[in-house]
Image (cartoon, rainbow, N blue to C red):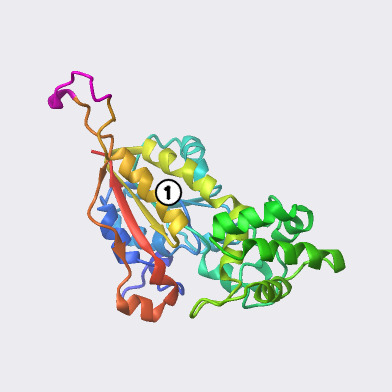
């Protein structure tokens, strides 16, 4: 058996909806593709496997650990840049890339981030209450909780976690921090468990609060609102944007964005315009939303909530 390049060897973390995302991108062997959320490189490696010698993958991630992991890929068709996905235009400008054939976004937190207690993303493991995707930038969850007003905390937990006990949790946070600083994940998880009066089946009471704080600390939804149009603006004709989301807040933004771009422009009802003269939509939705199959969910329970949506530039 011939030895395969380093980029094509087996890698530990299988990306969610990997084959489905590759099919969705309708990969051109000579194309240029952006993996806007590199993570540990599962999707980037799959792209490289499908590209020809002239193909190219540009990977982006804000997490320095992801950038370090990308050093294992030695394929000359691959390059990685530490940046936010919303900075895709700047990244491509600096690389002198005018247009690309596809952009892939795998939203939310990665499995390695969740599994590392030192990152503070998981309520299941004791660690510092950090939650920053780039630990060298911005304010940690602990620092924000130490200074935010009770109502501000409640609003974040309600808006980004859709937690009905947001007010009670915020009140408990303010009372607890008056006694001692909230610095660890287990401290916060225990506090939330005491404030949540009823439990959802098969879900830890801290789930929604941790999601909300992570989204707020990293400004994930604001980033997504910027990244989606920025990615579409760099697509070549026939290029595709594929987005994998994991919760309703993300998917709502993606669904609305794709619907709006794939719909004819809204004109006043009394405007005398023939149907033939109405401008065509800027983009078109490709197929129906794709979800993980039973076998993938069995192998990776985190894939259960994943949903893939695709947009194409005509």
Q: Quadrant of the N terminus?
A: bottom left
Q: Quadrant of the C terminus?
A: top left
Front-most of 79 and 65? 65
Q: Residue furthest top?
A: 272
Residue 271 belongs to the span the image colors magenta: yes
Per the image, the residue denoted by label 1 is: 253
Left or right of 275? Residue 187 is right
Q: Position of residue 199 (x, y in %)?
A: 55, 77
Residue 7 belongs to the span the image colors magenta: no
Asked if one can make out residue 198 in the rendered structure from this viewpoint, the answer is yes
Q: Main secondary structure of the magenta part?
A: loop
Q: Position of residue 58 (x, y in %)?
A: 44, 49
Residue at (73, 63) in percent of width and height: 171
Front-most of 131 and 272? 272
Residue segment shown in magenta: 268-277
Residue at (35, 65) in percent of width and height: 18
> As displayed, is residue 190 above or below residue 312?
below
Q: Position of residue 66 (x, y in %)?
A: 56, 60
């Amino acid at each position: 058996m011939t030895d395969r390049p380093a980029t094509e060897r087996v890698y530990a973390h299988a990306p969610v909806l990997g084959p489905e995302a590759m099919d969705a991108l309708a990969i051109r062997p000579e194309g240029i593709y952006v993996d806007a959320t590199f993570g540990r490189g599962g999707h980037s490696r799959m792209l490289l496997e499908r590209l020809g010698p002239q193909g190219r993958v540009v990977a982006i991630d804000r997490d320095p650990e992801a950038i370090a992991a990308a050093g294992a890929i030695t394929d000359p068709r691959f390059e990685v840049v530490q940046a936010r996905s919303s900075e895709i235009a700047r990244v491509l400008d600096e690389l002198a890339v005018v247009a690309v054939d596809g952009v892939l976004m795998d939203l939310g937190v990665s499995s390695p981030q969740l599994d590392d207690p030192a990152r503070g993303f998981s309520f299941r493991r004791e660690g510092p209450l950090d939650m920053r995707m780039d630990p060298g930038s911005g304010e940690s969850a602990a620092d924000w909780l130490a200074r935010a007003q009770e109502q501000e905390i409640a609003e974040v937990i309600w808006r980004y976690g859709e937690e009905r006990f947001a007010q009670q949790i915020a009140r408990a946070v303010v009372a607890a921090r008056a006694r001692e600083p909230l610095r660890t994940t287990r401290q916060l998880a225990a506090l939330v468990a005491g404030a949540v009066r009823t439990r959802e089946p098969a879900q830890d009471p801290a789930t929604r609060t941790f999601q909300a704080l992570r989204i707020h600390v990293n400004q994930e939804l604001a980033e997504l609102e910027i990244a989606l149009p920025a990615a579409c603006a760099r697509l070549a004709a026939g290029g595709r944007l594929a987005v994998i989301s994991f919760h309703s807040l993300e998917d709502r933004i993606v669904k609305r964005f794709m619907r709006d771009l794939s719909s004819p422009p809204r004109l006043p009802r009394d405007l005398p315009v023939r149907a033939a003269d109405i401008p065509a939509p800027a983009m078109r939705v490709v197929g129906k939303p794709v979800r993980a199959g039973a076998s993938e969910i069995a192998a990776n329970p985190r894939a259960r909530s994943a949903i893939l949506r695709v947009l194409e530039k005509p």
